[in-house]
Amino acid sequence: MTLRYRHLTQYIMAQKVSVKSFIIVFVSVMILGLMLYLFRPSPDLTSYRNHFAPTLPEGTIPEGKVKVTYWGVSSLLLDDGETKVLIDGFVTRPPMRKVFFGNIASDTGLVKGMIKQHGLEQLSAVITCHSHYDHALDAPYFAKYTDAVLMGSESTMQIGRGAGLFEGKLQLYHAGQPFQLGKFRITPILSKHVPAQKTAQWLGLQSNETRNISQPLSQPTKANAFEEGGTYDLFIEHDNNSLLVKASAGYLTNALDTLHADVLFLGIGLLHPNGKAYEQAYYYKTVGVVKPSLVIPIHWDNFFKPLRAPLLPNPYPDEVKGALDFLIQQTKQDSIALQLLDAFQAMYLF
Ligand SMILES: [Zn+2]
């Protein structure tokens, strides 16, 4: 090898080393950036404190009244003093590292504790709005350890089968077909999931396709094994009053056109990141159509953190503040009351 070629070889080798170093540094920075993004602290909602509902004094439920207790995300306990109905009932809230990098399972000890604490032994039903884990992870276990039946889509039924529920405990619901639980008359309405966040799509945690769970899903399992299985709003009538639970911030045009609800539980998860035009369209297709006298935003809390007050907002930049500022201003303009509920906070709906 001539001197000239030797220099060239050394030059190429030196370049290779520096390319390798560059790749290592680049990948490390990307991983560090992702970790900082995923594990950044939640903002707080101190400036929204005056929008939280007043504390409800303890006591028996007056005849004809319906009490709701908020359990974070879109989990709601409805109680009229005779019948208790649990929507979603997601309480385990696994930490982010398990959701992204491990397997998740219902904390059945926690579920049993909640049953005891809230006197749910005679629970009538636990009803899921869709089958993602932040709605359906614990639902079958609330049915398993109480008198309740698990109600939901075919995918939710598979989550129930995976948890060992026998068929008599499973009740498939159908869009547009009401069912009666005590004085509660509940109609599932076909809706649409909120469009997925780009980062979550990239990580394989969310998709805009509606996928189903086609066989019994046992736990522990990957968070993304909890496929959506269709998204439903729940229209709930009680005597002459009504409420609508809209767990996910998606909508089907005209789906709610014939409905009026006195109270609207309005899912705002990922609403603001979908842009101003989407946010406005969502408002007009939900609040604008069912014309409630009270809007209660839900699905705004950071569900990677344990279920306790004060709930922290989802950490996605500006997601909660943006949606709340928009809703507060819009409902004020339309003379509609807006209230927030903290973890385990209760109120009478009507
Ligand atoms: Zn979902």
Image: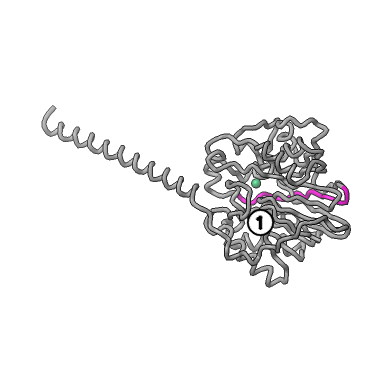
Query: Where does label 1 land, which residue?
Result: 342
Say whether mark 1 is within 8 Å of ligand 1. Answer: no
Task: Please tell me how crowded label 1 is: few (under 14), some (14-19), or many (20+) other residues with Cα within 10 Å.
Answer: many
In depth, the one of 310 and 25 nearer the eye is 310
Q: Quadrant of the N terminus?
A: top left
With 306 as the anchor, is 126 left or right in this view? right
Inspect this view and state whether residue 312 appears.
yes
The structure residue drawn at horizontal position 70% and vertical position 49%, both measured from the top left corner, is 75
Residue 183 on the magenta span = yes
Q: Amino acid at mark 1?
A: Asp
Image spot of residue 131 (x, y percent): 69, 41
Residue 262 point in image, percent of width and height: 79, 62
Residue lying at 69% horizontally and 50% vertically, measured from the top left: 71
Give the quarter of the image for residue 106. top right
Residue reaching furthest top?
A: 1
Locate residue 247, reporting x and y percent: 70, 51
Classify 69 as above or below 120. below
Nearer-the-camera pick, 83 or 226 = 83
Where's residue 268, x and y in %?
64, 56
Q: Quadrant of residue 293?
A: bottom right
The colouring scheme, among rainbow, by chain, secondary structure or one colour, is one colour
SS category of the residue bearing label 1: loop
Q: Nearer the viewer, residue 14 or 299?
A: 299
Residue at the limit of the structure toward the left, as seen here? 3
Left or right of 240, for residue 50 = left
Q: Is residue 64 above or below residue 160?
A: below
Image quadrant containing the C terminus: bottom right
Tell me the magenta residue range. 182-195
Is residue 284 visible in the rendered image? The answer is no
Q: Decide whether residue 80 is among the magenta residues.
A: no
- Residue at (84, 55) in percent of width and height: 237
